[in-house]
Image (spheres, rainbow, N blue to C red):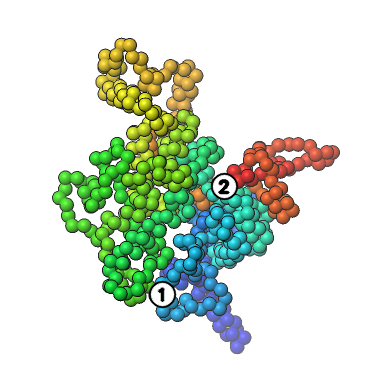
Amino acid sequence: MSSLGGERKVSASLSRSIRGTTPRLADLASTPESPRTPLLRSTSSLFGSPGGSFRTEDEYVVLEIGSRFVRGGFPGESTPRCTLSFGLEEQRRMGDYRQWDPEYGHKRRKRKRGEEWGQDYELYRLDLAQVDLGLVEDKFERAMREAYNKYFLLDTKPRRILLALPPKMPHSLMSTILDVLFGSFQAPSIMLMSSPVLSTVAAGLRSALVVDIGWAETLVTAVSEYREVHERRTTRAAKLLSEEMAKLLNAALANDVEDGSPKADVSFEEADEVLTRVGWCKSKPKSNRNTLYFPARTSPILEEFEDAVESPEPSVTIPFTRNTPPTEITVPFASLAKPAETSLFAPGTALNEFDDDELPLHHLIYRALLSLPMDVRRLCMSRIIITGGVSALPGLKTRILAEVEALVQQKGWDPVRSYGSASARHEQVLRQQREIFELRRQEGEDKVSESLDPDAPLPAGLQDPEEDAIDAKLAHLALRNGAPPSCSIGGTIRGVETLGAWAGASLVAQQRIRGIVEIERERYLQHGLQGANREKEVSVVPQRQSMGPGVVRGAGERASWTLGVWA
């Protein structure tokens, strides 16, 4: 009886311990550092259907690497399991217990002399002149170990990796990342895919113009049929936006500080938090849609209702607990939109004063569309995808699309910037073409012919195209088969939402789609990146080719591998 009672006590304590280890939503919210049970975990094949052994969703691990974050998860899921950032707290060494000091959270961290803005919060920089690749490798390995041991909770079986990377990444940096994944985590193969292409996949499109507003730069990529056909860059991105917000807060603090008090600049964490919480972007006024720039307005209410009575300016109170002594400042709400306008659009500055790598966003997008062929431009201009961390800023997407539309209405699609002495004649022709277009749209073809000079020919851009029998037949077949109405949209400025590059990578991995760049572990450890083929693209169609008597190459196996757009 004593043994039976002891067994009951053990079983009761064991059941209580099992119930105690099951995480609840309240426990996860109160203890964010506790281990998490992965959501939507696939059922094991031992307890599932007989066909469960053929399920391959969990064979891949989907990763997305950016300048300041690493996202990771499994195929088939809409959101990543974890998003790991890089900062001072993630770089603490063993034995560093400063975080438990009650006064440590109220101390403002000063930037070291010679360091760039936000340098301690970056994983890498594309300019490798002053980058320690060994430190980058340690940061990335530490983040991946945290993801595998705390969020993924996988078994010891090696998993393939689908890696989403920004295009044109330096080979030294790419080699550092691959060394960690192949060496420390024993990945059998890694498939590389470009972030703009995956953002297009996550939007449900085949062609798009992807505007990725990243940390150090903004990348505009034209994607046509899942291929990158054009690319432009600018340094106007989140880093410059954060610096402008810090300048605004420093100026407000300097006005409130008493004479003789020491001057203290705002830290990176404070500027980033203010930008995330109360930062916004001013919309383009409706009265000036056809102008390039517009004068600064004092109140955001008057921008929508110009005839309204001016009301007192709304203000925002921002506390600074890390200041010495702790203080708070009150700034007008309209002034919080100035950093986004100054850093991303640069109004009031002539276009000839910018270098090619610091163009405002709307001019960069317009030039990217202008450089595309006519058929590709028609598809991309009506499928503009604005993504990146800064794209969540309220009002930014609407402002970008409005500025691009104003540029198109003002300049058209003429690649010539200056006609010199013929500028007056060119403006007269453009004015005549606009009048003809308006008459054709309002009155019809008869009114157009009456208003024209009989000797002046109709411009080619306004003439009706000749009917093609093949195009008419294809249009009839598409109408009979019930083509979706979105396929015919083109020629207008239009924005499209996307779920992000990670969601696109998750969908690609779940559908078992093979990418152009697929690196095997043995080949990489033997030759490194130097073993890649110089050709940027190879065929992914399975081919049957004999390799001698009794030896046949496997279906879909490649004799060589390539770096694709990273070559």
Residue found at the far right of this picture: 549
- Point 46% across, 72% down: residue: 31
- Point 63% across, 54% down: residue: 172
Which numbered disc covers residue 168?
2
- Point 34% across, 57% down: residue: 279
Q: Is residue 226 left or right of residue 399?
A: right
Q: Quadrant of residue 139?
A: bottom right
Residue 165, position as x, y percentages in the image: 56, 51
- The residues tagged by marks 1 and 2 sit, at their Cα atoms, a distance apart of 39 Å
Residue 63, position as x, y percentages in the image: 56, 55
What amino acid is labelled 2 in the image? Answer: Lys
Q: Is residue 395 above or below residue 101?
A: above
Question: Nearest the camera: 63 or 7?
Answer: 63
Question: Nearest the camera: 516 or 366?
Answer: 366
**Tally of numbered discs:** 2
Q: Residues within 10 Å of mark 1 (few under 14, many from 20)?
A: few
Q: Is residue 162 left or right of residue 119?
A: right
Which numbered disc covers residue 107?
1
Q: Residues within 10 Å of mark 2 (few under 14, many from 20)?
A: few
What element does badge 2 sit on?
A: loop
What element does badge 1 sit on?
A: loop
Residue 204 visible, this angle: no
Residue found at the far bottom of this picture: 2
Residue found at the far left of this picture: 309
- Point 63% across, 57% down: residue: 176
Are discs 1 and 2 less than 8 Å apart at CB? no
Name which of mark 1 and mark 2 comes first in the sequence. 1
Residue 106, position as x, y percentages in the image: 39, 75
